[in-house]
Structures are given as C-alpha cells and as structure tokens.
Image (cartoon, rainbow, N blue to C red):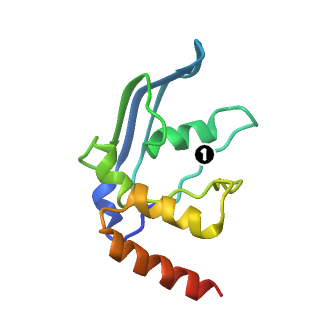
Amino acid sequence: MLKENNSSQFFPLVVKKLTYAHNNRQLIDGLNFKIELPGVSAIMGPNGAGKSLTLRLLHGLIKPASGMIKWGSTTNPDLVQERQAMVFQKPILLRRTVQDNLIYALKTKSKLDKATQATLLQQALARAQ
C-alpha cells in the first residue's frame, strides 16, 4: 500500500512475464497483470498459490529471475519502496526488543542522521507507553 495521497504517480502497476525460482524450482512463471486506478484490487488464491511471494516481488523484498514490474513510470524499486509499506499477515520482527526492531527499521529504511533517528526512536517509544 502506498503511503501518500498522490499514489496515482505509481499507477498503473504493470507486471510482465514475471518469473521467480528458488532452489531450482520455478515458483512464479510468466505472470502478467495490470492494476489501474481508481478501484480496489485483491490477490486471491489457495494456500501455496504464490500470493505472498508475488507481493514480496512487487515490493522489492525479493528479486525476480526475469520480467518487469513497473509502478507508474518507474521500474526502480528503490523509488517505490520509499513511498510504500507492506504489512505481513504474520508479524516479522527480529528476535530482539521493540527498541532494537525500531532501530533496525530506521537504519535500513532511513537516510536520516543518527541524532534524528535517536529522536524519532524516543518519540515512538514515548507514544507507545
């Protein structure tokens, strides 16, 4: 899901000939689709059909073997990742404290200096108390 109201710049979402393999096993093979605005879209299917895998590919969490994912006018996953978030069905946190998980997120997703990161961390922890 995109974070800002001007998400239309990232649509349509076009996927062409997307493939993904793991351990010499083809898991996604030639996936094609297009999602346009306005509207609501859903990815549905039985367990093991590749729904979560497809979302991980779309959000740049894993790299496809081949094919194209185009959000609006860009195929650069870094530009899209800065403007979107994905919530997993089962929470994926490191086996650490809440503070350590927040620090990890700030380090991996933020271009802010350490002092600003520390301030944001303290503000988030204070709001949660």
Quadrant occupied by the C terminus: bottom right
Give the vertical position of 48 relative to 86 (above or below). above
Residue, far top: 24
The crowd level at tag 1 (other Cα within 10 Å; few <14, some 14-19, many 20+) is few
Whole-percent x, y for residue 114 in the image: 35, 69
Residue beneath label 1, please? 43
> Callout 1, which amino acid?
Ile
Q: Residue at x 62, y 84 (%)?
A: 128
In the image, 70 versus 34, the foreground residue is: 70
- Tell me the quarter of the picture where residue 118 sits: bottom left
Q: Residue at x 34, y 49 (%)?
A: 12
Residue, far right: 47
Give the SS element for disc 1.
loop
Q: Is residue 63 visible?
A: yes
In the image, 17 versus 98, the foreground residue is: 98
Q: How many marks?
A: 1
Whole-percent x, y for residue 88 in the image: 63, 54
- Tell me the quarter of the picture where residue 65 sits: top left
Give the vertical position of 23 relative to 54 (above or below). above
Left or right of 103, for residue 90: right
Give the vertical position of 85 relative to 18 (above or below). below
Q: Is residue 5 visible?
A: no
Left or right of 101, for residue 85: left
Q: Residue at x 68, y 54 (%)?
A: 95
Q: Residue at x 68, y 32 (%)?
A: 49
Whole-percent x, y for residue 127 in the image: 57, 87
